[in-house]
Image: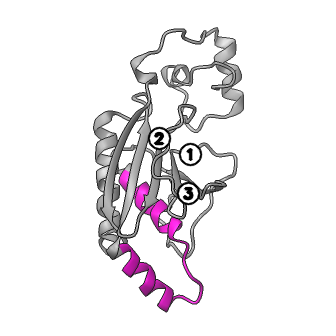
Amino acid sequence: AAERGLDLASLVKAGIAQPYHVADLDLIKSSGAAPSAAVSPSAILSLVTARADAAAFDALLEEMAARLAQPLDPHILVAGFAASALREDHQAEALIVAAEVGVEGARMLYLDPDRHRPSRPRRADKNAMPDLILRDMTDARITAIAIGSDVVPSLTLGRDRTAFTLSLSFREDMLSSGAAIRLIDDFARRLEQPLETLV
C-alpha cells in the first residue's frame, strides 16, 4: 500500500475487516480514494519505550532448558507475552504475531501464541496479515526500531545484561495512545513475571 501511495485507513472506513490482502489494494484504487497529500495526525508515527528486568525471564528459561529435551526458543515465549498484552485492548478473536528475529529478520507468523503451549506453537499462514510485529533484537545492538511503512504496531525487544529494552512504534489509526501505553506496560510486566503469565 505504501509503495502504491494508498491509504489503508480507507479500508477501515469502508468496514473491510483485517487481515488485508493484495486484492484489497485494488479495491482502494477502484474506489477512487486518492492518497492524501497532507499528513493526518493518524499518520504520524509514535514511539513508547520501557525497560523490564530480565532476571525472572532468564531463570525461567534455565529451568525450562533443564526440563525439556529440546531447548525452547525465547522468542516464542515473548511472542505469547506480546499477544497476551495486545489482547487486553484488542477485540479480535484470533491474533497473529509476526516474530522477526535478529538483524537478518527471519520471520515466523504465530497464530494466538498466548493460547498455545510454547513448546508447540501454532503457525499462521505465511501470507496472513499480522496484528503485531515483534522484532526480537536481543542478540543485536539495536534497542529501538520505528519504521514508518509498518501497517501494524511494531514492538522491538532489545537487551543489555540485566534488562530488556522495549519500544513500541504505532500510529493512532493502528492503536490509540492509551492502548499503546497499556500494551507496553503489560508486556514489560509479563517479561518481569513470566511464571504468572504462563500459569
Q: Please give the range of residues in magenta.
A: 57-85
Q: Nearer the viewer, mark 2 or mark 1?
A: 2
Q: If you read the primary sequence from the N terminus, does the residue marked by circle 2 or circle 1 appear first?
A: 1
Q: Give the CA distance from mark 3 to mark 1.
A: 9 Å
Q: Is residue 77 above or below residue 44?
A: below
Q: If you read the primary sequence from the N terminus, does the residue marked by circle 3 or circle 1 appear first?
A: 3
Write down the residue under mark 1.
130
Q: Amino acid at mark 1?
A: Pro
| Crowdedness near tag 3: few (<14), some (14–19) or many (≥20) residues, C-alpha within 10 Å | many
Write down the residue under mark 2.
153
Q: Evaluate if marks 3 and 2 touch, with contact meaning CB atoms under 8 Å apart.
A: no
Q: Secondary structure at mark 1?
A: loop
Q: Quadrant of residue 83?
A: bottom left
- Asked if residue 77 lies in the magenta stretch, the reply is yes
Q: Residue 2, percent across and down?
A: 63, 25
Which numbered disc covers residue 111? 3
